[in-house]
Image: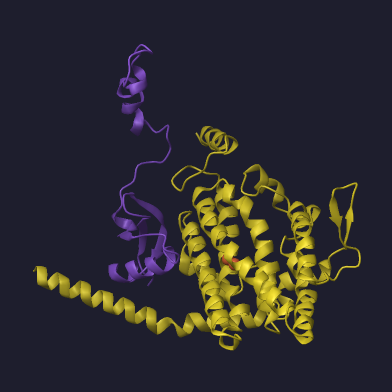
Amino acid sequence: MSWPLYEVFVRGKRGLNHVHVGSLHAPDDEMALRNARDLYTRRNEGVSIWVVRASAITASSPDEKDPFFAPAGDKVYRHPTFYSIPEDVPHL
Amino acid sequence: MDAELEREFDRVVDAEQRIEPRDWMPDGYRKTLIRQIAQHAHSEIIGMQPEANWISRAPSLRRKAILLAKVQDEAGHGLYLYAATETLGADREDLTTKLIEGRQKYSSIFNYPTLNFADVGVIGWLVDGAAIVNQVPLCRTSYGPYARAMIRICKEESFHQRQGFELLMTMMRGTDAQRRMVQDSVDRWWWPSLMMFGPPDEKSANTEQSMAWRIKRHTNDELRQKFVDMTVPQARALGVTLPDPDLRWNDDRGHHDFGELDWEEFWQVVGGDGPCNRQRVAHRRAAHENGAWVRDAAAAYAARRAGSDAEEVA
Ligand SMILES: [Fe+2]
Ligand SMILES: [Fe+2]
C-alpha cells in the first residue's frame, strides 16, 4: 500500500502568502512536514510550511473560461479603472 | 465535443499559455508527457549512483559535503518530477516498478562508470552542463507542473555545474598526475555527454509532435550544437583537450564543426548493453527492496497513531 499524497505550501519570507510548491508522499502529517522541509526548503526557501492531504482539497476547474467565474466577468464596476476622473484632481 | 475541446487546447498552447492538470488534453499529449517526465525522473534517481560512488572517498570534508549536497539535490529533482507525473494520473509505485523491471528508460549517460575522482568534476561540468542546455528550454514547456519543476531544478543545476568546474580547476593547478586524471576523465565523458541530446534529428521519432505541442522547444541537434559551442571556450580556460580531431570553428556557419558520434555505441547503451546498465538497475532494485521495512514500519506507526487518536476522541 502506498503512502497518501500531500500538497505542500511554503511561505518564502515573513509578509508573504504561503504558495503551492509541489507535492510528496508521506505516511502521516508529521512525516509529510519533515519530508517537505528536506524536499522543498534545502536552500532557505521558506520560513513556514503547510502540508495538507491532497484528498482534502476541493478544486474548481483551472480553465479561466469556466462558467464558475462568470459572475465576476461582467462586474467591471468593481475595478478602479471603471471610473473616469479628471486628470487634474489630485490623490485619486 | 472533443473537437471543440481540442481547439481550445490548441489555442492555449499556441498562445504560449500553460496547460494545467485539470484541463482537457489529448490522450497522446498526456501519454507523451508521462513517458518523458518519468524518464527524466528516473534519470535523476539513477544519476545519483555514479557520483555517490565517490562520497566515501572524497579527498576532503569540503568536497564530501559538496558531493553529498549535490547527490541529495538529484534525489530532490527526481521527486519533483515524479510529483509532476502524478498530476497527469500516473502512479508513483507503478513508475518505480517499471524502472526496476527495466520497462522504462533513463538517460544513457548514467550507464558509464566513474573511475577516478576527476569524474565527479567532469560530471558536474559536462553532464550537468549538458543537462542544463536540455532543461532550460523546458522551463517554458507547455505543461504547467513540468515547467515549474524545471524552473526549480535549473536553479539548483547551476551549483552542480560550478562545483564541478571549480573542482577541475583545482586539480589542473595540482600535480601532473592530477592533470592526467582530468584529461583521462574528459576523454571518457566527452562523447557520451554529446549523446545526452538524443539521436540525430532525422532519427528522432517524437520530435515533430512534441514541438507542435510545445513540450519540446528545440531539436536534439540544435541543443547539441549549442552545448559544443558553449563548452569549447570552457575547455580552453581549463587547459584540457576535447578528444575530437574534427572539432574546429567554422566561420561560415558561426558554429563549431565536430566529428560524427558513434551512434552504434549510443543504440547499444540505450538498448541495455552499456558498461553499467545491469548494475544500475540492480542497485536501484536492492535499495527499493531494502527500504521495504522502513516503509512498512512508518505506515504501521501512522496507522496505530490514527487508531489511538480515534480512541481518545471517543
Ligand atoms: Fe538534476
Ligand atoms: Fe545536477
In the rendered image, residue B40, in percent from the top left (x then y), is placed at 59, 63
Is residue B113 among what the camera can see?
no
Which chain's colour is yellow?
A: B
Q: Which of B68 and B203 is in front in this view?
A: B68
Q: Would you place residue B147 above or below residue B289 in this image?
A: above
Q: Residue at left 73%, top 50%?
A: B219
For the point 32% across and 57% down, which residue is it?
A55
Q: Using residue B178 as the reference point, say whether residue B137 is left or right of it.
A: left
Q: Position of residue B248 (x, y in %)?
A: 89, 59
Foreground residue, B67 or B275? Answer: B67
* Residue B73 coordinates in the image, percent (x, y): 52, 69
Quarter of the figure that contains the C terminus of chain B:
bottom left
The percent position of residue B140, horizontal first and vertical second, equals 58, 47
- Residue B265 shows in the view: yes
Quarter residue B264 falls in: bottom right
Residue at 65% across, 71% down? B166
Q: Is residue B269 left or right of residue B51?
A: right
Chain A color in figure: purple
**Ligand 1 appears in which quadrant?**
bottom right
Q: Which of B74 and B17 is in front in this view?
A: B74
A91 is higher (above) or lower (below) than B183 = above
